[in-house]
């Protein structure tokens, strides 16, 4: 951990937002002690675009601290988004997300889903895009939000946010390829 006796550079501040479960547990304890509302979302965030910024800013507005669970490179490949994905490595994607002023923490996860992270973090608010359904209870449904049962059982909220139309990583990738 970086000592607080010197002024941190912008890069050090950004890097300090990228965590493992071990480093984040101490920070979570402080946030909870201060009654900060913890918001959690997850994704690949392969090429950060305006749609992502809109979504993440709105997610951040739902509480005091926004934690992003970032799919590792291996985890992202499990999502079948195409053989070229992810386009950027996990450390690059984590740094870009951590550089956003409304992001409090980024944590990379290796699993196919963020269930372990949700169990560990116990967020007050779980957020996904509106292509999911906060009321879906069937884990086999494509609209089911992984971890929603855990968050609800703990008294938390599950929210969805509409996507900003016309913005997606796939459309940017296709434009670059000239498709």
Image: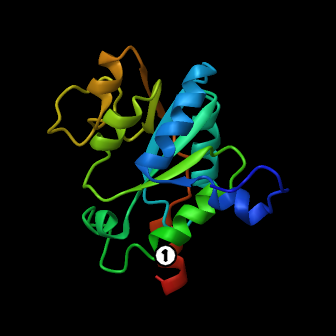
161 or 113: which is nearer to us?
A: 113
Quadrant for the N terminus, please. Answer: bottom right
- Residue plotted at (62% across, 43% down): 104
Where is residue 98, by image quadrant?
bottom right
- Callout 1 secondary element: loop
- Residue plotted at (57% across, 44% down): 55
Above or below, comparing residue 110 to residue 62 in the picture? below
Residue at far right of view = 7
Q: Position of residue 17 (x, y in %)?
A: 61, 52
Residue 134 in view (yes/no): yes
Where is residue 128, by image quadrant?
top left
- Residue plotted at (21% across, 25% down): 137
Count of numbered marks: 1
Q: Position of residue 41 (x, y in %)?
A: 46, 42
4 or 86: which is nearer to us?
A: 4
Residue at far bottom of view = 178
Pointer 1 local density, CA inside 10 Å: few below 14, some 14–19, many at least 20: some
9 or 168: which is nearer to us?
A: 9
Residue 132 in view (yes/no): no
Q: How is the image coloured?
A: rainbow
Question: What residue would you read off at disc 1?
Answer: 88
Q: Position of residue 169 (x, y in %)?
A: 49, 66
Above or below, comparing residue 20 to residue 92 in the picture? above
Residue at far top of view = 155
Above or below, comparing residue 50 to residue 54 in the picture? below
Describe residue 16's horizontal placement relative to residue 84 as left or right: right
Above or below, comparing residue 15 to residue 129 in the picture? below
Q: Position of residue 89 (x, y in %)?
A: 46, 75
169 or 113: which is nearer to us?
A: 113
- Residue plotted at (40% across, 72% down): 86
């Amino acid at each position: 951990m970086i000592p607080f006796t010197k002024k941190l550079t912008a890069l050090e501040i950004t890097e300090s937002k990228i965590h493992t479960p071990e480093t984040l547990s101490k920070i979570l304890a402080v946030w909870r002690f201060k009654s900060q509302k913890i918001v959690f979302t997850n994704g690949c965030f392969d090429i950060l675009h305006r749609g992502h910024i809109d979504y993440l800013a709105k997610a951040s507005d739902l509480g005091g601290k926004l934690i992003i669970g970032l799919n590792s490179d291996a985890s992202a490949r499990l999502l079948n988004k195409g053989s070229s994905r992810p386009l950027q490595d996990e450390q690059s994607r984590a740094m870009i997300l951590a550089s956003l002023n409304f992001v409090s923490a980024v944590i990379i996860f290796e699993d196919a889903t963020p269930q372990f992270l949700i169990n560990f973090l116990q967020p007050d608010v779980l957020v996904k895009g509106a292509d999911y359904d906060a009321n879906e209870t069937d884990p086999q449904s494509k609209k089911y939000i992984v971890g929603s049962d855990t968050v609800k059982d703990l008294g938390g909220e599950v929210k969805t946010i509409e996507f900003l139309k016309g913005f997606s990583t796939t459309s940017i990738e296709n434009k670059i390829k000239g498709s």
